């Protein structure tokens, strides 16, 4: 049987994406991991990812084994390939939250079980699945809905914009000069049937949008750029005035953790339009649906 990996959300077809979201809502799920484990390699600190994935594995009947990067020593104590080969002998799947996306690619090339990207410098596909699940629960159909991203076109944006395009949503991105998506990503979105309208004006991006999403201005590993980024992102805070420019029924998303008063106003992240807490909970449901799909196609 061919092993399926999920290193980016468009490793799924649009129909498979819908299937994963459908499986995420099955309660109780099947238990395809009965008697098996899932290895979780966490090079980066984690709150939501670790808790969500561990509990998803438990709900599928399996046993999660979480390892910090320093415990494993990828490419120090042993290569990414050797680690993947070893873990494949113990577990039904491998999830990895890494600094370098190439580590995931190397693990997937050597593993005999599914490898899932739990975050890399390139993408965050399980977050994108949770975001779509949250929006589908709120709106129903996503086709024709407009997503506005405000801030850095980072790894979270990369996966979310691909997923939104695959779901038939329009995407606009408001980014400071030098922080927008590159041409290769825009072409990748177009290849999936979507388009990203890029602007340096948050008001332009948000106008009439059904969904407004953002992330921190400085991600893990960029701490040395914090002050420069704070200056560059002046005017890119999602506040009440910006939300007022969106559609009357607009909702707000944030992958968390949020820096209140920086990329988002307290009144927005804690306000009535915010879906951040269902969004966070859906991290568990989304990865459960994904693992179920990758392990056996989601059979009962």
Image (spheres, grey):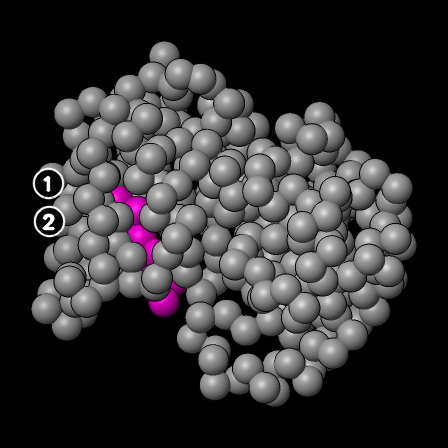
Q: Regarding mark 1 in the picture, which secondary structure is present there?
A: loop
SS class, disc 2? helix
Left/right of residue 177 with respect to residue 159 in the rendered view: right
Q: Position of residue 162 (x, y in %)?
A: 60, 49
Kindly identify the residue that appears in the image at 15 percent across and 55 percent down: 83
Answer yes or no: is residue 282 visible. Answer: yes
> Dividing the picture into quarters, in which one does residue 146 lie?
top right
Q: Position of residue 236 (x, y in %)?
A: 75, 70
Q: Looking at the rendering, which quadrant does residue 218 occupy? A: bottom right
The reply to whether the magenta stretch includes residue 17 is no
Residue 100 magenta-highlighted: yes
Instruction: Indicate whether 177 appears above or below 16.
Output: below
Q: Which mark is residue 89?
A: 1
Q: What quarter of the picture does the N terminus occupy?
A: top left
Segment tinted magenta in the rendering: 94-102
Which numbered dot is residue 86?
2
Residue 109, above or below 136 = below
Q: How many marks?
A: 2
Give the camera-side residue of 228 and 15.
Answer: 228
Please tell me which residue is depicted at 89% across the width and 54% down the height of the picture: 245
Nearest to the observer: residue 259 or residue 126? 259
**Residue at the far top in the pictured view:** 300
Q: Are marks 1 and 2 in contact (CB under 8 Å)?
A: yes
- Residue 159, percent from left and from top: 55, 52
Q: Does residue 105 show up?
A: no
Which residue appears at 71% of the width and 62% of the height? 265
Q: Residue at x 69, y 45 (%)?
A: 274
Q: Callout 2 environment at 10 Å: few (<14), some (14 to 19), or many (20+)? A: some
174 or 182, which is in the foreground? 174
Q: Is residue 50 above or below residue 295?
A: below
Horizontal and vertical percent position of residue 249: 83, 38
Q: Is residue 296 left or right of residue 68?
A: right
């Amino acid at each position: 049987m061919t092993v399926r990996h999920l290193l980016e959300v468009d490793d799924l077809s649009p129909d498979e994406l819908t299937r994963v979201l459908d499986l995420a809502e099955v309660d109780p799920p099947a238990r395809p991991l009965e008697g098996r484990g899932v290895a979780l390699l966490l090079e980066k600190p984690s709150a939501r990812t670790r808790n969500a994935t561990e509990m998803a594995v438990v709900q599928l009947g399996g046993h999660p084994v979480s390892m910090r990067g320093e415990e494993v020593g990828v490419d120090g104590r042993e290569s990414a390939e050797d680690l993947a080969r070893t873990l494949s002998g113990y577990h039904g799947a491998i999830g990895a939250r890494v600094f370098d996306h190439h580590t995931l690619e190397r693990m997937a090339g050597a593993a005999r079980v599914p490898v899932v990207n739990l975050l890399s410098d390139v993408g965050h596909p399980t977050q994108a699945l949770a975001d779509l699940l949250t929006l589908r629960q709120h709106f129903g159909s996503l086709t024709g809905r407009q997503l506005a991203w405000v801030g850095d076109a980072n790894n979270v944006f990369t996966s979310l914009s691909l997923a939104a395009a695959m779901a038939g949503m329009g995407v606009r991105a408001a980014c400071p000069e030098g922080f927008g998506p590159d041409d290769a990503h825009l072409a990748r979105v177009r290849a999936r049937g979507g388009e990203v309208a890029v602007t340096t004006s948050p008001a332009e991006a948000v106008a009439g949008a059904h969904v407004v999403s953002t992330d921190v201005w400085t991600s893990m590993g960029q701490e040395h750029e914090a002050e420069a980024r704070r200056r560059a992102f002046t005017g890119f805070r999602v506040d009440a005035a910006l939300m007022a420019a969106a559609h009357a029924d607009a909702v707000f998303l944030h992958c968390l953790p949020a820096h209140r008063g920086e990329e988002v106003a307290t009144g927005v992240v804690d306000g009535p339009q915010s879906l951040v807490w269902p969004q966070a909970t859906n991290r568990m449901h989304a990865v459960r649906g994904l693992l179920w799909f990758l392990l056996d196609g989601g059979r009962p």
